[in-house]
Image (cartoon, grey):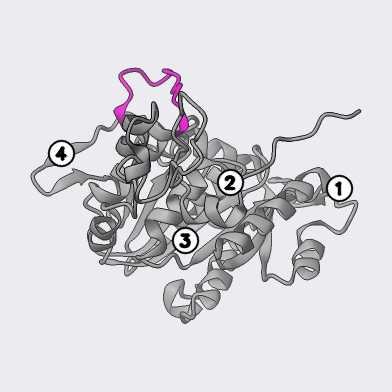
Amino acid sequence: MAPSLEAPEPVEDVLANPLKQKPQLVAPEPEHCPGPESEQAGTADSCAGCPNQKICASAPKGPDPDIPLITARLAGVKHKILVLSGKGGVGKSTLTTQLAQAFATNEDNTVGVMDTDICGPSIPKMLGVETETIHVSASGWSPVWAEDNLAVMSIQFMLPNRDDAIIWRGPKKNGLIKKFLKDVEWGELDFLLVDTPPGTSDEHLSVNTFLKESSIEGAVVVTTPQEVSLLDVRKEIDFCRKAGIRILGLVENMSLFVCPNCTHATEIFRATTGGGRALAAEMGIPFLGAVPLDPRLGMSCDNGKNFFDWYPDSPACAALKQVVRGLAEQLGLDSKEVLPEE
C-alpha cells in the first residue's frame, strides 16, 4: 500500500490563521473540551483539572494585534506588489531587482524592495549595497538607499558575516518579516516590491496576512519557458487564488539567449508546451512579457551595477521596461507616466 499524507488542515483555516500553531498537548482532549484553539481554551469550567489547561490558556488567540500597526506604518505606500515563483532558480530575485530599477529610472517614482527570502538574501548584492547596515532611530529602522529613489531592506544587512547561514524555523522568519513591515520607516513610496522565496511556505502566508488590511495590489509570477518550471507555477497560481491574491501577470524569464555581439536569439530553454505565454492563456491571467537572457545582466548583478544605466540598448532592458509598462496598466496607472517612452 502506498504511503499517504496526513490529513491536511483545512485550507481556509491555514489561510485565515497562517501564524497560528496548534498547541502541543500532553494528554488527549477530554470529552467536554471546548477545543485547544478556541477562545475558551484553558479558561472554561470543563478545563479545571485538565493536564493541558496551562498549555491551552497560554496559546495565542484572536487576530494579531500588530496588524493595525503594520497598516498604519505602510499608509504612505501606494502600491504593494509581491513577486512569486513556484520553483527556485527562475531568476525571481533578479527580476525583482530589475523591476525596481526600471521603476526607478523615472525620477518621479520612489521605489522600495523588501527581501523576504530570509535564507537566501541576494537583493543587496545585486543593488550594490551588500556591505551597508541598518540605522535604528526612535521612529524605526531606516531602509538602505541604493539610489536616491530606491530603498531596500534585507536580513543581509543584519548578518555579522556575509556568508553566515540563516538556520531558522518558521516562527522566527515570520517575526523578522513582521519587523520589516512594522518597524521599517518606508515613508512615502509609489511602489513596494516584496521579493519572496520559492514555493508557498510560511513566508508567503505571513506576508499575505500582514499586508491584507493594508491592501496588497497583487502578485507578479515568474517562470522560465520549460514545462518543469511551469508545473510549479501552476501550483503558485492556485495558491494565489485560494489566498485571494490578485495575479497581476506572468513574466517568462530567460525566454531566449540574445548574443551581445550579433544580437542573434537562441532558444536555450525550449518551451515544449508553449512556455509562459501559453500558460497565461490557459490560466486566464495577463502575460506581462518575456525577458531574454543577457550575460551582461548577470554581470551587472554580480557587480551591483544598474543594468539600465550600463546597457540601455540591451534587448533585455527593453523587455523589462515593457513588463513594467504592462504592470502599470494592470495597476490602473498610465504606463507613459510611470515609465515615459524614450
Residue position marked by numbered label 4 in the rendering: 136
Residues under labels 2 and 3: Cα distance? 13 Å
Q: Amino acid at mark 2?
A: Lys
Q: Residue at x 39, y 37 (%)?
A: 128
Q: Dot 1: what SS?
A: loop
Mark with earlier residue (2, 3): 3
Q: Is residue 97 above or below residue 212?
A: above
Residues under labels 2 and 4: Cα distance? 29 Å
Residue 2 in view of the camera: yes
Mark with earlier residue (3, 4): 3
Which label lies toward us, 1 or 4? 4
Do the residues under discs 2 and 4 have CB atoms within 8 angstroms? Answer: no
Rendering coords of residue 276 (x, y %) = 76, 59
Residue range in magenta is 158-170
Callout 4 environment at 10 Å: few (<14), some (14 to 19), or many (20+)?
Answer: few
Residues under labels 1 and 4: Cα distance? 48 Å
Q: Amino acid at mark 4?
A: Val
What mark, if any, has residue 270 been given in the picture? 1
Left or right: residue 229 versus residue 143 is: right
Give whichever of 286, 169 is nearer the camera.
169
Give whichever of 305, 230 is nearer the camera.
230
Mark with earlier residue (2, 4): 2
What mark, if any, has residue 81 been given in the picture? 3
Residue 105 in view of the camera: no
Q: Dot 2: what SS?
A: helix
Give whichever of 190, 51 is nearer the camera.
51
Instruction: Report the residue that reaches farthest toward the left.
Output: 138
Q: Dot 3: what SS?
A: strand
Which label lies toward us, 2 or 3? 3
